[in-house]
Image (tube, grey):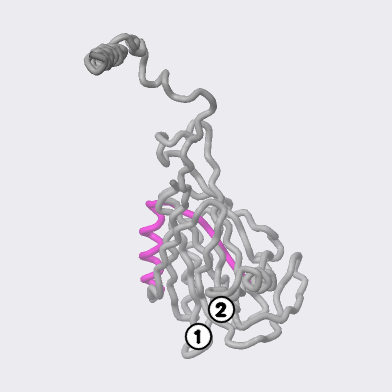
Amino acid sequence: MNQLLKMMLLFFATISLAGCGNNIEEPQLKGIKIGELAPTGRRIQPQLLRTTNINAITFELPAENVKSLDEIWKILNTSAIRCIDPNGFAANGLRAGAGGFAAYNKVIELLKSANAKKVSTTALLLANGRSEVVNTGRLNSKTTVSYIYRQGIIKSAEVGPGILGLQVTARQISPAGSLTPDSGELGRVANVQVVPVISVSTEGLAPELAARLKANELRFYSAGFNMMMKAGVFLIVAPEEYKPDEITAAGRFFTWSKPKPAVRVLILVCTSVL
């Protein structure tokens, strides 16, 4: 009898527990949008990689044809170039100018007429505020070089071994209305700086040692300049004359005396500002 009573009590208890789940109220979600369930507060926008893409094209022509470049300067906008030190830039024997798509084809034809040959093409992918170097030569050992400082003053420094080249830096300037990810590159411009440099290779070195070596790099700011660039715009930098004088930036970075006297012309073509 007691056993039967226990079984009946267990049966009723099981039914009661099973019925409890039916009395639980479901959340009232009718009329509530998914967006309203998201956490409140400031949302962090994804950071876009902003880059300035430039093709660096180097031409070489015989030294006796350097005056043929005068025809090129006639069709270029030299006022678009802002020298860091105008007097120093002139003392370094360099010339620079800018142009657009229509002028580019004319420049290439004039270079061909001067018997210029394309030496290299390098694609520069410049993250905002970062630099890359367009190589023009090497210093195989440590040596003392003389160079033109600001206002035409001649200084000396011990550098090398290292790489001779042109350091290209791009810092983007976003006009009003182009700050959203959907705005595209229309209207975007970049302040592009070009400075001759004798740099050192730090590949594979510890960060502390690399930083010390980079601190000893020699940058020829007196021969540097800036220009505002956007997609489709190009700039040219070249020596004013053939003068194998390594004190000037034109002589050290753009002039060759062996195996045959020659000068080089650098064209930087902006393909996009993203």
* Badge 1 element: loop
Q: Is residue 18 visible?
A: no
The amino acid sitting under disc 2 is: Tyr
The residue tagged 2 is 242
Q: In the image, which residues are magenta?
A: 92-114
Q: Residue at x 51, y 34 (%)?
A: 44
Residue 73 coordinates in the image, percent (x, y): 50, 61
State how far apart marks 2 and 1 are (Cα).
Answer: 8 Å
Name the outermost residue toward the front. Answer: 1
Magenta region includes residue 16:
no
Residue 225 coordinates in the image, percent (x, y): 61, 59
Q: Is residue 254 visible?
A: yes
Displayed quadrant of residue 156 = bottom right
**Total labels drawn:** 2
Looking at this view, is 233 or 94 the one in front?
233
The amino acid sitting under disc 1 is: Pro
The residue tagged 1 is 261
Q: Residue at x 40, y 72 (%)?
A: 120
Label 1 Cα crowd, 10 Å radius (few <14 / some 14-19 / many 20+)? some
